[in-house]
Amino acid sequence: NPDDEYIMEIDVRIVGDTANYDRNFNVGIIDTLTTAQPDQYEIIGGVVKAGEFEGKLSVKLFKSEMLKDTTLNIGLKIVDSEDFLSGNIEKNQFVLGFTNKVILPSWRFIRYFFCANSSTECYRIFVLTTGLTKFDFAEFRVYGTAGSIALGTKFGDYIKEWNKNNPDNPLKHDDGDKAGEEIIPRYYTHSKYD
């Protein structure tokens, strides 16, 4: 996430009946499960909308340099509010983990249409050019072979254009088996770049 802050919404299910008005619920922090400092997050609050059994807890997460290589946790527990009691102890706790590390998805289908080798930089370009965060069988079924090749060509054209405009700084794998080597796309517009 390139932004300085992000609002995470956590689904919460109530036990009992719905009401004809919005109801608020509260959470407390479980210190023994929390590694984040208070200035790294903000509990915005929880609400269950009128007529619904599920609500949302909103937590604002703040970006920091340490999140590049660390995962922070916030231990949360439902506590009593005007509208709700905390509920079953077995189900009223949750640990929210957050990081700015890029977690690579399965590379199985990405390797056939985008790039044979995985790396964080390659994945970043994949997300930037396609708007997708993963590409597995479900996505392949939606796009089919022709659509997948079109997405792969968009990815490849981005790399080729960058390398053409930055000959002294081509796009390279930053980690993984091919760290330091140029990213080689499977598809690109040959008539434009060859």
Image: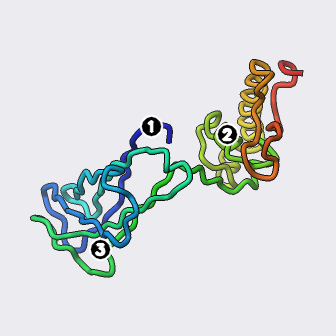
Residue 123 falls in image quadrant: top right
For badge 2, the amino acid type reads: Phe
Disc 2 or 3, which lies upstream in sequence? 3
**Above or below: residue 184 compared with residue 62:** above
Residue 50 falls in image quadrant: bottom left
For badge 1, the amino acid type reads: Asp
The label number, if any, that marks residue 3 in the structure image: 1
Pick the residue in front: 54 or 83: 83
| In front: label 3 or label 1 | 1
Crowd band around label 3 with a 10 angstrom C-alpha radius: few (<14), some (14–19), many (20+): some
Give the distance between the C-alpha atoms of the residues marked 2 and 3, in whole angstroms. 38 Å
Q: Is 3 situated left or right of 146 in this image? A: left
| In front: label 2 or label 1 | 1
Disc 2 or 1, which lies upstream in sequence? 1
Residue beneath disc 3: 92
- Look at 75% across and 22% down and name the residue there: 161
Disc 3 or 1, which lies upstream in sequence? 1
- Look at 29% across and 57% down and name the residue there: 57
Residue beneath disc 2: 126
- Residue 53, image x and y in percent? 26, 65
